Amino acid sequence: MKARLIVHNLSELTHYQKVLLNREIYGYADNSNNNTYHYKREGILAKMPNFRLLKGAYIIRKEDLIKIKPIYKRYNVKYDIYEIIIDPSKFKKV
């Protein structure tokens, strides 16, 4: 199966921009009412099959690339995309 390996570099972003970007891509845990209620806010990767390698490096399907690129463009993030072939069983199911 053809897939894309995406590696991004956040070194030129401010801390605030890094937090916003990571929340949008990976999601985050949200608490309210003095930690009485806990919510899991999903990022864009939760909505597509993916395989996270390291912080800042993950593999997605070829057709899901168009969903990720606008996020990187919005934050002016430097990223590299590599075309790879991977076994479909390695992907996290949605």
Image (spheres, helix red, strand yellow):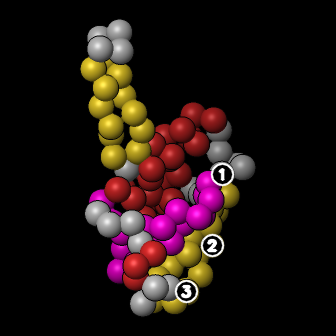
Q: Nearer the viewer, mark 3 or mark 2?
A: 3
Residue 31 vs residue 11: left or right?
A: left
Residue under the image location 32 percent in, 66 percent down: 93
In the rendered image, which quarter is residue 53 located in? bottom right
Taking 86 as reference, is 10 above or below it? above
Residue of label 2: 80
Quadrant showing the C terminus: bottom left
The tag on residue 83 is 3
- Disc on the earlier residue, 3 or 1: 1
Residue lying furthest top: 34
The amino acid on which the numbered mark 3 sits, given as a three-letter code, is Glu
Under tag 1, what secondary structure?
A: loop
Crowding near the residue tagged with mark 1, few <14, some 14–19, many ≥20 C-alpha atoms within 10 Å: some
Under tag 2, what secondary structure?
A: strand
Real-space CA distance between mark 3 and mark 2, rounded to the nearest whole angstrom? 10 Å
Real-space CA distance between mark 1 and mark 2, rounded to the nearest whole angstrom? 12 Å
The amino acid on which the numbered mark 1 sits, given as a three-letter code, is Leu
Residue under the image location 35 percent in, 22 percent down: 31
Under tag 3, what secondary structure?
A: strand
Pointer 3 and pointer 1: residues touching (CB < 8 Å)?
no
Write the start and end of the magenta stretch as one range. Answer: 47-65
Residue under the image location 40 percent in, 82 percent down: 88
Taking 34 as reference, is 8 above or below it? below
Does the magenta segment cover residue 60? yes
Residue 67: give x, y in percent of width and height.
Answer: 36, 67
Pointer 1 and pointer 2: residues touching (CB < 8 Å)?
no
Q: Nearer the viewer, mark 3 or mark 1?
A: 3
Quadrant showing the N terminus: bottom left
Residue lying furthest front: 89
Residue of label 1: 10
